Amino acid sequence: MSGDLRDGRIVIVGASLAGLRAAETLREKGFAGSLTLVGEDPRPPYDRPPLSKQVLLGRVPAEDTGLPLRRPVDAQWKLGVRATGLDPIEKRVLLANGEQLPFDRLLITTGTRARPWPNPAEAALDGVFTLRTSEDAGRIAERLDAGPRRVLVIGAGFTGSEIASACRERGLDVTVAERGPAPLVGALGGSFGALAAKLQRAHGVDLRCGVTVTALTGNGRLTGAELSDGSRIEADIAVVALGAIRNTEWLAESGLAAGPRGLACDAGCRAFNMYGIVTDDVFVAGDVARFPHPLFEYQLLSLEHWGNAVEQAEVAAHNMVSPGPLRRPHLAVPAFWSSQFGLNIKSVGVPTFSDQVVLAQGSPKEARLVAVYGYRGRVTAAVSVNQAKSLEYYQRLIETAAPFPPEPVGTDRPEPMTPVPSDVPDPAVLSHGPTVALTGHLPDRRLTLVRR
Amino acid sequence: MAADTLFHRITDYANRADPYPLYAELRESGVTRQQDGSYLVGAYHEIAALLHDPRISSDRRNRTAADAAATCEEDLPVSFIAMDDPEHNRLRRLAMRPFGPPHTPGRIDAMHGEIARIADELIAGLRGKDRIDVVDDFAYPLPVTVICRLLGVPREDEPRFHAWTQEIIASFDPTPGEDLAERQRSGLESRRTMGRYLGELAEKRRGHPSDDMLSAFVNDEGPDGRLTQPEIMATSVLLLIAGHETTVNLITNGVLTLLRHPEELERLRRRPELMPRAVEELLRYEPPVQMLPQRSPLADIEVLGTTVPKGAPLILVLASGNRDPLRFRDPDRFDPTREDNRHLGFGSGVHSCFGAPLARLEVQLALTTLIRHLDNPRLVEDPPPYRRSPVLRGPRHLPIERDTTGT
Amino acid sequence: MNIVVDLNRCQGYAQCAFLAPQVFEMHGEEALMYLPVPPEDQLERVRRAAAACPVQAILVGEEAGADVR
Ligand SMILES: Cc1cc2nc3c(=O)[nH]c(=O)nc-3n(C[C@H](O)[C@H](O)[C@H](O)COP(=O)(O)OP(=O)(O)OC[C@H]3O[C@@H](n4cnc5c(N)ncnc54)[C@H](O)[C@@H]3O)c2cc1C
Ligand code: HEM
Ligand code: SF4
């Protein structure tokens, strides 16, 4: 059985972080058959997080972001080619160049793309950008080098906030327009958002919350924008940071459970078909996946996190070459980081899966703190600002479903510790969409994650 | 044998040369209360978790039983290694300012050439000798010279601060026994003397800046302000002692381990680029800081099913965690190319070693230089005589012989 | 040779920023920024940094797909 699984043809569609780590893991686990990676982006896999940080700061050229290999993958690469369809009966991937790729097992890692500005004519103005690919980042960096008078960032999620941070660090004037009440609200809730708003303003960002951009104006070239509060902004660059769209359109005819929220799969990364029946030859990992997580009541999570792409790819690859009883579930506690305005923000768990939050360590004034999130009396997430070394402790509380609020501990904490509503908004209210979407719901079953 | 005597046996000088079987016993027995009321933890994952646990204090004033080593006075506060956040963080950041990133990122890297030169000079001084004491002739003078230059302490004062240092180290030796209180008293006295000495050195630089850390402490001011005079004294005592008393043991343990594994010595001689990872393995296999004796919980906590009461001495045996088979495959094997070597040799969490990058560079250069110049080195005595402390463990002398033709 | 740092794992111990300061840089107290493609002459330092990272978060390797084009 497992002899068979080490052989045959595996195709991976989506040649970025998840696709690459899966390919390496397949080889590491002894897969000896043929391996093909298909990617729409002409560049071999590169790392996206630096694009909104080092690259926009002008410290690293956009091309210098290639991912290092963990080991040789001995694969056939088809780059610069889009997959346009999947024939599940004949087991073929259809490519835009007319080619058809037969497979025995398929891994889908097509990730997401930036949500474009909804008005195509305005989006086409010179100076209007989105940020997802290294090409995007290179173009924006070039414009920032040229010293624009003002940059408009539309949407204050993580990407928008990091872009604003890079602009301020370059000494550029920047306006951030956010429909929600504060930056980062979608991912971290209103209480944290208030802190983020203060931080941005302290760094000289012209932050406008509770407004939408109603029009981008210009004549061929962007000159400014109109806001819903009637005000007008002059800007020569606008970066649209309104969140991401999952690359699932190519699967529309495939019969798989693919839609705007991603491609649903089981805990072992096997894709569901549209009837909710699990397949055994199509796997999915990374930003495009929606998967059930026992720590979050088996709701289907869609994460746009670097760490999730890596870990889920490893599990998917393992399961693609392992017989049933040796397969593993993808149970890693979600985690991500962001760096902006000189601060290191890290999160474990799912902050949006919460009703309350409490400042557990440190102080906002010193910009060193840990905030702990709870849902119905148990700990579900923790976010640190320049306090990364403490996060492990809170991760353990999440894994063991410890009671919320957590016991007051240590010498570096506010007195008294008072939980407040975490103020997680309805995702429909935000400009940029949450970076963690809780989608679907299955009956509550309690499970404790056992580590190691 | 009842577990409660384990700490006694671990600290017993008779077991200094090879405490590792006792550590295996410690891991077997879980977490138990010792005769003196302390609790020992020897399992890797639990030690790592406790080092990141905000309920654990490094401040001995949080101990239930009074403790002379915890005495803190206006004129000489405890140093930040024995404090908790946020005060620990503030002082560590101020001390870091002239030492490393983010404010002075290039300082240690820039010492590369100087450290290599010091190592070469020490080797040159051994020319013609076919019998060497690795400790006195090389492993001790190297880090002493380096830390003196870095801090701005005259090298020729070494005999004075050496004596104080020995008293201070003895006072942190948790070996149970009647002389503990006496040791702690004289340790405190030496700390005071050494603090005054370093405080005066720093004071002389006020208004006359030079390129050393004492000068930066008195002359430079950052956004967080600067250290007060008593804080300068406490911090520079810590840096001077931590800066050489540990590194000497790592160099010596390194030579000893390589002489016990001649094939690895040969490999490193041929491929010096393997040295950085070999040094990490030494920090796992023979760590100079065997245990952290000054933690205590701020609340009753549970470790491996045992409740450790608030205020009890909690001793984290790093050297045992480093040999935990639940974390490291084949833990008793010295493997300089070991993968994913997340050892505990420099501690972990907020108190993780301040000087680790300097120590790493010093030991990498020291061992590379030494093995390049030693022709057919041989141990004269195995095991060599050890220093007394079970905490800062290492040979007191390491006599070796070598061929001198051609060197 | 390229590098990538697993910044979920990284806890800001700054060992890398001490040992290869031209490649790894602390941005504020804790955030790490680095050059994914370090200059040739920094490779030895990068290896020292990778060996020293207490959480082993630094991956150094051949650039993926370098053989593709
Ligand atoms: C600017 C920016 C900053 C970020 N910063 C952070 C951060 O600080 N922390 C963090 O945790 N995460 C961050 N992320 C998120 C992280 O980069 C993603 O989670 C990660 O890239 C997901 O990897 P993936 O392989 O699943 O998907 P992607 O990287 O999106 O890759 C999908 C690939 O599939 C290809 N593809 C799509 N459709 C097709 C098709 N039909 N046919 C063929 N190929 C196709 C695409 O071209 C793409 O190369 C950031 C992302 C961006 C854009
Ligand atoms: C091989 C050599 C070294 C080893 C094995 C070592 C080991 C350690 C360990 C295990 C700790 C943690 C203590 C605790 O958690 O309570 C520590 C802390 C410390 N070390 Fe080192 N060390 C070495 C070299 C150095 C050097 C060269 C310096 C100074 C330049 C130094 C300065 C310090 C300081 C100041 C602390 C306290 C950090 C804090 O509390 O935040 N060490 N060291
Ligand atoms: S040494 Fe490791 S943990 Fe420390 S900053 Fe560098 S990558 Fe992060």
Image: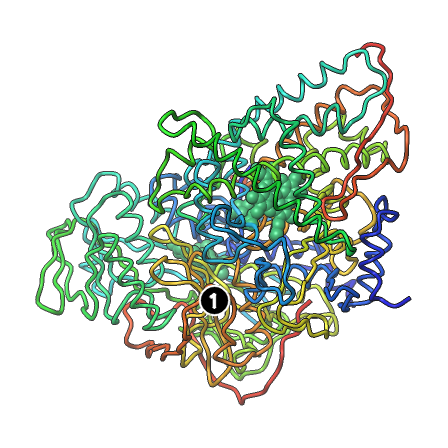
Read off the residue under disc 1.
A288
| Colour convention of the picture | rainbow
Rendered view: A111 above or below A234: below
Picture residue at 69% right of the left edge, 74% below the top: B307
Rendered view: C64 above or below A392: above
Residue B343 in view: yes
Is A85 on the left or on the right of B253, as rendered? left
Q: Chain of mark 1?
A: A
Say which quadrant the N terminus of chain C sits in: top right
Q: Is mark 1 within 8 Å of ligand 1?
A: yes
Where in the figure is residue C23, as x and y percent of width and height? 48, 37
Can you tell which quarter of the image residue A358 is in?
Answer: bottom left
Can you tell which quarter of the image residue B362 is in?
Answer: top right
Q: Nearer the viewer, residue A201 or A428?
A: A201
Rendered view: B394 above or below B151: below
For this orientation, the residue located farthest to the bottom is A443
Where in the figure is residue A360, as x and y percent of width and height? 45, 70
Where in the figure is residue A6, as x and y percent of width and height? 73, 60
Q: Nearer the viewer, residue B256 or B86?
A: B86
Amino acid at pointer 1? Val
Rendered view: B318 above or below B53: above
Other residues around mark 1 within 10 Å, as few (<14) / some (14–19) / many (≥20): many
Ligand 2: which quarter? top right
Is A231 on the left or on the right of A343, as rendered? left
Where in the figure is residue A216, as x and y percent of width and height? 15, 59
Residue A72 in view: no
Picture residue at 34% right of the left edge, 78% below the top: A423
Can you tell which quarter of the image residue C63 is in?
Answer: top right
Is B342 on the left or on the right of A113, as rendered? right
Secondary structure beneath label 1: helix
Picture residue at 72% right of the left edge, 29% below the top: B139
Q: Nearer the viewer, residue B60 or B293?
A: B60
